[in-house]
Amino acid sequence: MSQPKVLFVLTSHNKLGNTGKPTGWYLPEFAHPYNVLAPHTHITVASPAGGEAPLDPSSVEMFKSDKASTDFLDSKQALWQKTEKLSDFIGRAKEFDAIFYVGGHGPMFDLATDPTSLRLIQEFDSANRIVSAVCHGPAALINAKAADGTYLIANSNVTGFSNAEEDAVGLSAEMPFSLEDELNTKSEGHFEKPSEPWAEKVVVARGGRLITGTNPASASAVGQAIYEAIFGDVMSTK
């Protein structure tokens, strides 16, 4: 029996609004789920532009004491330096068991509206595959639609980086939209968040086919939830 396959998606966007500061994908939100899933699945990494996907340098500094992140940074550069182009996976959802969107502020600027990504999500959903994301990765879901034209997350429990967390890092004004507000609107009021900012929170919905995590602290648990959904250990929830 062949290993299950997971498509990891990274942002290609590297500028933080009008600040002039760099952004991209967030180190622990790639490292931790990768470490959970890599021993058991075949992971392919893609981005809208292909090639090198920008790593947010602030995440390197913030998680310099996190061994899993620093080890990943030191030994897995090829994963983000040689990403495949997202468009190459159109029509191939059935080859995979799950698609996973890594967070970082970058997805707020490209993956939220990227037509290739939106088409891929619909194809994964139509094939009954797992759609998953962490932190700002759920930005990729806000405009995603099911094959019947309804929003993918309509009437489904979902989470992502909260307004309180965005305010705490001082970047709410630099974002093109509020992720919490958009997720809450598109899910028809089903946005969930931890009891306090920065706490771990993972939401599993649609019988294990929609998995989201709130913040960097949730990254490992999102990876575990994806593992459980793939290997059949997940409890179905609305």
Image: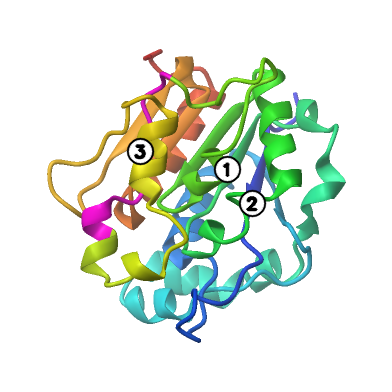
Left or right of residue 162: residue 97: right
Left or right of residue 223: residue 126: right
Query: Element under label 2?
Result: strand
Q: Earlier in the sequence, mark 1 or mark 3?
A: 1
**Front residue (pair 3, 226):** 226
**On screen, 122 above or below 59?**
above
Q: Which residue is mark 3?
A: 159
Q: Residue 217: x percent and y percent? A: 30, 54
Q: Earlier in the sequence, mark 2 or mark 1?
A: 2
Q: Which residue is mark 1?
A: 100
Residue drawn 77% across and 68% down? 82
Separation of residues labelled 1 and 3 (CA atoms): 14 Å
Q: If the image is split into quadrants, where does the N terminus sit?
A: top right
Of helix, strand and loop, which mostly describes the magenta segment?
loop
Circle 2/circle 1 CB separation < 8 Å: yes
Q: Viewer-nearest of labels 2 and 3?
A: 3
Q: Residues within 10 Å of mark 3 (few under 14, many from 20)?
A: many
Q: Which residue is mark 2?
A: 9
Q: If the image is split into quadrants, where does the C terminus sit?
A: top left
Stretch in magenta: 155-165
Query: Element under label 3?
Result: loop
Q: In the rendered structure, which amino acid carries the disc numbered 2?
A: Val
Residue drawn 43% across and 78% down? 60
Does the magenta-highlighted stretch encompass residue 164? yes
